[in-house]
């Protein structure tokens, strides 16, 4: 694996040169560059305010219910401490790509919500689920806006650059966490991988349970959000239908998708979850998501 451009940290430290193989040795060198890490509590920062504000997102009114669970999520968030340089990265991303930043806020809240569900066999640490979500898309801070916000299908070269963002984030997190990188860096590297091996960047099948959680809520928000590459977002129903199809194909954990559906159907939470073959919402027209332009 290689990057097409030099990669610098937020403090201007050169981490990896363009064309340099991203090997285990390279990553160890990057982690060793990290000086003493300063952790800051986010409870008194602008980030905490933005996360709390995200609970007002009307698209997820049913999922982010009832309020008492939201208060528990907020208490979990208040316990989080993160490297100061990652906070600086998020501040930079907030200015550079408001959509990506807001997407990260939503994913953190949704991951926190799902982590509280007692029906999931693998229990999650609530504050860790939120923390890992906060830097899953950190690598997009180095992707050109001309690609992130392109309204038409991207080229093969542009797709290669776009799909490098998990690797970019992975390298950045090695630097920001230093010797503790193994506890956190996988959240960036694995969130686009799928259980059937169809994801990227490596097409692996064995995924950390937090990566599986982040991957599902990341896909949901990407589908129902307004983006330049489609005039109209997916409806919540159409997005959930698509996620169900993906789960049936073995790409997502069914229990995670089922949990989102139950949350979104507040009026009938105990209903059996099945894939409807008739009367399903359709994907929006003029949708360039996932499409590559013909050369």
Image (spheres, rainbow, N blue to C red):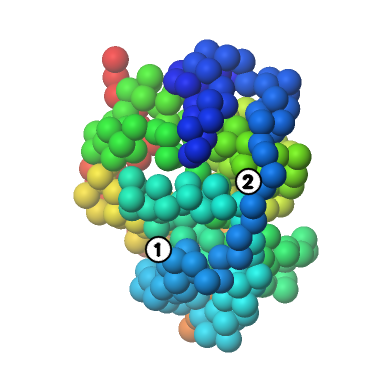
Which mark is on residue 187? Answer: 2
Residue 24 in percent (x, y) is at 73, 23
Which mark is on residue 43? Answer: none
Could you tell me which residue is drawn at 42 percent across and 34 percent down? 142
Quadrant including the N terminus: top right
Residue 118 in percent (x, y) is at 72, 73
Could you tell me which residue is drawn at 57 percent across and 76 percent down? 74
Residue 175 in percent (x, y) is at 63, 36
- Mark 1 neighbour density, 10 Å: few (under 14) some (14–19) many (20 or more): some
Question: Relative to 270, is 101 above or below?
Answer: above
Whether residue 232 is visible to the viewer of this picture, yes or no, is yes
Question: Relative to 36, is 262 above or below?
Answer: below
Residues marked 2 and 1 touching at CB (< 8 Å):
no
Could you tell me which residue is drawn at 53 percent across and 26 percent down? 14
Residue hosting label 1: 236
Residue 17 in percent (x, y) is at 53, 18
Label 2 – label 1 distance at C-alpha: 25 Å
Left or right of 143: which side holds 12?
right
Question: Relative to 225, is 270 above or below?
Answer: below
Q: Quadrant of residue 186?
A: top right
Sequence-wise, the earlier of marks 2 and 1 is: 2
- Mark 2 neighbour density, 10 Å: few (under 14) some (14–19) many (20 or more): many
């Amino acid at each position: 694996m290689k990057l097409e451009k030099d990669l610098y940290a937020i403090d201007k430290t050169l981490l990896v040169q363009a064309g340099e193989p991203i090997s285990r040795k390279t990553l160890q060198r990057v982690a060793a560059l990290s000086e003493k890490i300063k952790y800051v509590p986010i409870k008194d920062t602008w980030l905490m305010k933005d996360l709390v504000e995200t609970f007002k997102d009307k698209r997820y009114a049913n999922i982010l219910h009832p309020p008492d669970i939201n208060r528990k999520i907020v208490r979990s968030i208040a316990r989080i401490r993160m490297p100061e340089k990652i906070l600086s990265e998020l501040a930079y991303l907030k200015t550079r790509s408001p959509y990506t930043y807001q997407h990260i806020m939503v994913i953190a809240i949704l991951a926190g919500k799902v982590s509280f569900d007692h029906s999931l066999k693998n229990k999650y640490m609530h504050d860790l689920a939120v923390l890992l979500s906060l830097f899953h898309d950190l690598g997009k801070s180095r992707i050109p806006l001309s690609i992130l916000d392109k309204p038409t299908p991207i080229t093969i070269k542009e797709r290669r650059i776009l799909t490098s963002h998990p690797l970019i984030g992975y390298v950045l997190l090695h630097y920001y966490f230093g010797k503790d990188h193994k506890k956190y860096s996988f959240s960036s590297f694995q969130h686009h991988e799928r259980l059937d091996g169809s994801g990227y960047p490596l097409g692996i099948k064995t995924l950390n349970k937090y990566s599986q959680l982040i991957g599902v809520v990341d896909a949901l928000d990407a589908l129902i959000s307004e983006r330049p590459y489609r005039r109209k977002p997916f409806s919540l129903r159409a997005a959930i239908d698509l996620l169900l199809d993906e789960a049936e194909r073995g790409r997502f954990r069914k229990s995670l998708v089922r949990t989102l559906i139950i949350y979104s159907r507040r009026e009938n939470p105990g209903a059996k979850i099945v894939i409807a073959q008739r009367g399903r919402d359709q994907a929006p027209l003029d949708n360039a998501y996932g499409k590559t332009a013909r050369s």
